Image: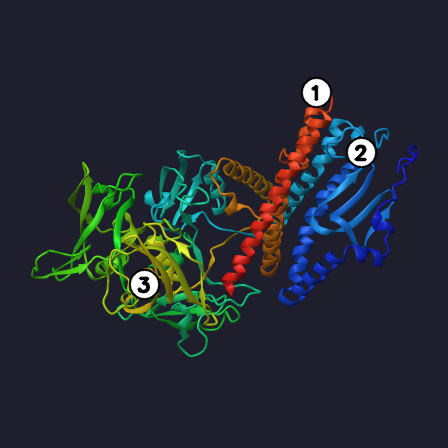
Amino acid sequence: MDPTVTPTPHNNDASLQETPASWFKQNALNVIIGVALLVVVLRYLHPIDCLMAAAGLTLIIFLHELGHFAAAKLCNVRVETFSIGFGPALPFCSYKLGETTYKLAVVPLGGYVKMLGQEDGVIDGEGDDDPRSFKNQSVGERMFIISAGVIMNLILGSVLFVIVYMHGLEEKPAVIAYSEPGGTAWRHGIASGTEIKKIGNQVNPWFDDIRPEVWGTNKGDQLHMILNYKGQQREIQAEPLLGEGAPFPMLGILPPESLVLLNTRRMETPPYRPGSAAASANAKQGGAGFEQGDRIVAMTDPDSPTRAVTYFASSSMDPSGEYFQYQRRLARLSAETIVVLVRRMNTPNDPPTEIVVPPSIRKELGIRMRMGPIVATRTDSAAEKAAIQVKDGTNPGDRVVEVEVVNADRSSTVYVAGKSDAPAVANRTVLPLDPIRLPMELNRWADRTPGEKIVKLTLLREVDHTEKRVVAELKWDENARFDLTGIGAANTPLPINALGLAYQVQAVIDAVSPGTPALAASLLANDTIEAVKLSARDYAGKLNSGGWQEIKPHQWAAIDAIIQRDAVEECEIRVNRAGEKLTMTVVTANDSVDPMANDDRGLYLMPDFRIQKANDIGEALSMGGRRTMRMIKGIYINLYAMIFGRVSALQTLSGPINLARMSYLLAGESPWRLLLMLALISINLAVVNFLPIPVLDGGHVMFLFYEWIRGKPAPERVQTWLTLAGLAVVLTMMAFVVGLDIYRLVTTWIGRI
């Protein structure tokens, strides 16, 4: 305390005058809610994980406010209150030490430091004549005090990064495993296993470095990329695509997974989807099938004449090689029962356990859908070389009406869309063209047919507003066939990778097969499906129904993918039949003939992480500093993308509830992952808090810059109105993200019922 100043007494804090009984009477509702939350934690959650997550989040808030407090003390400013949380103090959590009241408040969504003479939007007021008033300090000192909280959060984030790098940080490699059909990477013919050596300004990136570069693009921007595939390097210019309904622009890629099955410390979720082939797998020697943490080390080899189980060939030059070998074997053995060898997590030195896994059987409705137009081709593919035309805006693309292949015995098979009028020909089999089954049928044909393979397509092409039949012969690319693709969005088309084309499947029924559930449900040819409601069983065997999903005319491929993935047993279907709206229920049936092509058999695999570890404290400091700058840049790019509509705030923003939930989950997995999460939150808090919005630290600094330039504060009326506007923005955003968090929490909970 400055002995030259006689402080004004500030003993009117109500929390210091109240008795415990009176406090409880005024805050009974808060106490009841707090007790209820405590009961939930003790009954349904893990208290130690909750405590770790709460301590970490409190540390972030505490250090932010400590920055303001310490800077104020250094500048000899009187600090009246130091509060963690808002509202009244908790019982016995408010103490006065010297001139400052320290308290832990009821609402734990932040905190504040109250200094003498600091009132938002007020120029004249308390502390005008006190030299220790905040408003009587120089502009530079006030900027320092206001900025100190943000500085402390940046320091905390950097320190946590350094600690994590000293231990070793798990990072996803910038390797492309999956590409979305029709997406940027797929169109450029980027093969599975390709490593990104440079993207935009990022050299030797990790996978998480890619997103900021992609989100920072505008429509029409081309990202410069340097790619490496099996030692061959190439450069491309690629435009990230913002697809219909997509929350942000994307390259359409996913990183590789490891051959370790799902492993969660706190959740006993099996490492496979309910109803999948993996769920029905059993150990060959008897006992349990797949368990959490199992490591796949070998499986049935399609190149072995006896289908023997062999180990994967490891390569020090390609750590992801085993994963891609595993996926290729699955694709080639999709119709067969396989044996997988796993090492148990708890007994890694014991001999591997052999697990027998049946093929995945398709769920069938008994309907054949209508072939849609070709919407994308791959660079340097057979489809591009054959000049196949794709859908471009309102211009229709080529539509496949016939597919002809020559079999190993020189006979031919022709798949025909709609009703075939072709005359019978010796050694020629005519089958209906099912757009959903076509990629699977061609893969099987390729497996049975040695040597060079040609696929002849008959296409309908619009020329001068008239449809003409065009024939194109495409060479089958066996390597491209094994590129990993997946239908992850409603608008994703169905690919034939070996031909380099992707087409839509229309939600219009071309034919209903006799003796099937669809016929029993009275579905008819030419019915247009407009919405579906799917029901599948959970791990306990309970049949759960989802909500209605509206379907656009070109989105049936995504619906079929969901039916197969979730082993859907019942579909409610809304159809439009010549203008009449009808609803009917179809019970799916197992198709014993057609297993799923390129199926993962339902296993959940862990991400493929590489450990990035510093060799000494100097390297850790350098890596932590770079990671901090990378985070700051990524946050600003994300904000820029949201402002200009390239990124959906609805899909990307998180509020305090979700941050607390993620911290809790990570605390249950590893304290190091929790530290990483806290570092990310701390830096996010610093960046957001320094935005030029009144009531935030950045808004205060904005007013101080004005005062520094003009030599006098902004008019009080201007400050007041801007402060009220800033408060409205902050409260609106807080309500939005909290509501979003609650919505996500509720929908996640409902999905688990």
Q: Which residue is mark 2?
A: 117
Picture quarter with the N terminus:
top right
Counting residues from the start of the chain, the first of labels 2 and 1 encountered is 2
Residue drawn at x 19%, y 38% is: 465
Residue farthest to the front, as pictured: 580
Report the residue marked by disc 1.
Answer: 710
Relative side of 477 to 613, left or right: left
Residue 421 % position (x, y): 11, 56
Q: In terms of secondary structure, where does tag 1 sit?
A: helix
Say whether residue 581 is left or right of residue 537: left
Query: Real-space Cα distance between discs 2 and 1?
Result: 21 Å
Note whether 205 is above or below 40 in the view shown: above
Estimate the spatial distance between the alpha carbons at disc 2 and disc 3, rounded to whole Å. Answer: 71 Å
| Mark 3 in CB contact with mark 1 (< 8 angstroms) | no
The foreground one among 352 and 365 is 365
Q: Position of residue 605 (x, y in %)?
A: 45, 61
The disc placed on residue 456 is none
**Mark 1 belongs to which amino acid?**
Arg
Image position of 557 (left or right of 416): right
- How many neighbours does mark 2 have within 10 angstroms: few (below 14), some (14-19), or many (20 or more)? many
Mark 2 vs 3, N-terminal side: 2
Q: Amino acid at mark 3?
A: Met
Residue 164 visible (yes or no): no
Circle 2: residue type: Gly
Please, what secondary structure does the residue beneath circle 2 have? loop
Q: Residue at x 92, y 35 (%)?
A: 6
Q: Quadrant of residue 724?
A: top right
The disc label shown at residue 596, or none: 3
**Which quadrant of the view contains residue 391?**
top left
Within 10 Å of disc 3 (Cα), the crowding (few <14, some 14-19, many 20+) is: many
Q: Position of residue 398 (x, y in %)?
A: 23, 44
Q: Is residue 562 visible?
A: yes
